[in-house]
Amino acid sequence: MKLATYKDGSRDGQLVVVSRDLSTAHYATGIAERLQQALDDWNFIAPQLQDLYEALNGGKSRHAFPFDPARCMAPLPRAYQWADGSAYINHVELVRLARNSKVPDNYYSEPLMYQGGSDDFLGPCDTPHFVSEDWGIDFEAEVAVVTGDVPMATGPDEAVESIRLVMLANDWSLRHLIPDELAKGFGFFQSKPATAFSPVAVTPDELGEAWQGGKLHLPMQVQWNGRTVGLCDAGQDVTFHFGQLIAHICKTRNVRAGSIVGSGTVSNKAVEKDGKKEWVKGYSCIAEKRAIETILDGQPATDYMKFGDTVRIEMKGRDGQSVFGAIDQAVSRLPR
Amino acid sequence: MKLATYKDGSRDGQLVVVSRDLSTAHYATGIAERLQQALDDWNFIAPQLQDLYEALNGGKSRHAFPFDPARCMAPLPRAYQWADGSAYINHVELVRLARNSKVPDNYYSEPLMYQGGSDDFLGPCDTPHFVSEDWGIDFEAEVAVVTGDVPMATGPDEAVESIRLVMLANDWSLRHLIPDELAKGFGFFQSKPATAFSPVAVTPDELGEAWQGGKLHLPMQVQWNGRTVGLCDAGQDVTFHFGQLIAHICKTRNVRAGSIVGSGTVSNKAVEKDGKKEWVKGYSCIAEKRAIETILDGQPATDYMKFGDTVRIEMKGRDGQSVFGAIDQAVSRLPR
């Protein structure tokens, strides 16, 4: 099934069930008011939401209305955890290659992961505000999952089974704030402002054969100012599947229902053409484009985003239909 | 006023108001069921809780019962944010001095801060479970505050005014997992398992003159296996007050109600005696004790905690009464 959260002026919004083709929606009132509430008591509430979903798809629900992504908050407008991995090591390799630095061996056996802020997410069409363009404003197109409860020391295979929902994320990054923060060793903080999520979160069964072993085999479409810049396959070149990412978190602690886990920037390897490397799938963040330029030409040519720039992130199923709806945002200066 | 959360089998527990002397409590039913609910709508709900608090202190509440810290969850059993600073640079200096490494200059002008997991906190008397003693199990006694909403780009002075509640934290740390994680640059993750909080969270007005400009001038009592090892003054040698820590978070994003911000390990400077340094106030984490031993003797003599070890963290007011109740925990092996 497909779930979304409609703005209603409250901090957590109103849970709605959305039809498979994203054309209509229905309030889940009477079943659950908020998505976190459904996740807290999933085995009891999910079947009731599923019934409503089936009625909606069959055109049999009594109070359906046209679905409007612009009215959506993030599926979880705030969450108790947002842990973002770096599952596509190709992304790390590129960035490192651009500065002539080797990827440490343990990056291939243990996921990189940072703990993100989760108290104030952006809806798919919400305006991200930044104080300055000089901070190096960048998007990052990612796949993210929402978990149920996962006890400490759970292994990767079992952890896959704990995945309740899948969605897309735009992990906004401030590139010029990153070097100083990473040098301090305490990880990203100011360099990772509020993250945005897709209009709709979907259950894994909804993804059919595209969802296999904790990997999502669909292309991540990224448009920057209306131009397609990325079409990377999210199921290709993944060093760690979502079960491994979740198991990484719960090595030393329990993971509780409603935790969001991110894949990191989706990134595909270059292909060799006439002895030359070509990144035919494009990029899911500008930093990677700049790394490729540096590798090829010795320096980056593409600048980061300016106020007014737009980014659109979407994934279409094998039937050509949008699976999660689109993240569609325009960068803006923080009003004084 | 003083607030706590009683275990009731649910994820968020039941909000109770606790008397000033911590002897009695009263369910806040009818006002707010959960602490987050009160924080979401503080200006409306806090005065009602305050009325109940005054009735309770005056012995005039009808359904008061004896307060039992062992029945407490963390005041916020799960939260939307847990951001832990490192406000006592003396702690950083000690650890660095022990490995002959200078503290970078910017550590004195910009707080170190990491984003912690906040989906599964421990109550004050809950058993922390660990898979292995070899991970270097350590306590960290800290002061923590809970904020209201703080808009992006708020300054330190205004940020102090957003503090709703003050409490104590035991920021459990796995010391032997830290070097590898910090080397990766993405910050603490597996090395920071579930944090525990004091039985009671109190409003700043409750602290009287001990609370000044975002600093808490009271001694942090730490007992390890029943022996007092630390009595550091939390208001002394603080490089960054809580307003500065909160302002650090909201440089690039909004901070939403119910965010928890930690001070880092409370730590006081050594005093000079006969030309020698003496750390007369003791320590609030074992890592610091080991650093002092290394400085004095070339190597650490004190080992980290073993299964069965206990730690008790408490703060007494100038009247000798416990302000927040005690964090009192016994380390245990994760059951198979």
Image: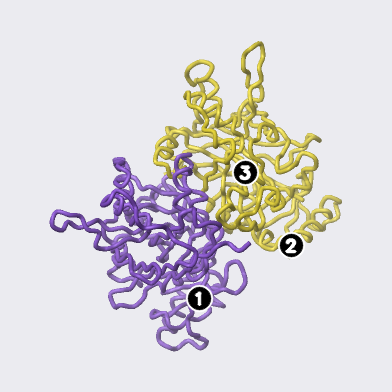
Chain colours: A purple, B yellow
Q: Is residue A272 left or right of residue A295?
A: left
**What's the chain of the residue with tag 3?**
B
Residue named by callout 3: B124
User: Which one is closest to the eye, mark 2 or mark 3?
Assistant: 2
Residue named by callout 1: A70
Determine contact: label 2, label 1, CB under 8 Å: no
Q: Nearer the viewer, residue B317 or B204?
A: B204
Q: Nearer the viewer, residue B19 or B292?
A: B292
Q: CA distance from mark 3 to mark 1?
A: 43 Å
Residue A266's spot in the image, x, y percent? 34, 59
In this picture, is A202 found above or below A66? Answer: above
Determine contact: label 3, label 1, CB under 8 Å: no
Q: Nearer the viewer, residue B32 or A76?
A: A76
User: Which one is closest to the eye, mark 3 or mark 1?
Assistant: 1
Residue B251's spot in the image, x, y percent? 58, 52
Q: Amino acid at mark 3?
A: Pro
Residue A271's spot in the image, x, y percent? 20, 58
Secondary-structure class at tag 3: loop
Q: Is residue A208 left or right of residue B111?
A: left
Task: Answer few, some or many: residues within 10 Å of disc 1's Cα (few below 14, many 20 plus, some between 14 and 19).
Answer: some
Quadrant showing the C terminus of chain B:
top left
User: Which one is closest to the eye, mark 2 or mark 1?
Assistant: 1
Residue named by callout 2: B45
**What's the chain of the residue with tag 1?**
A
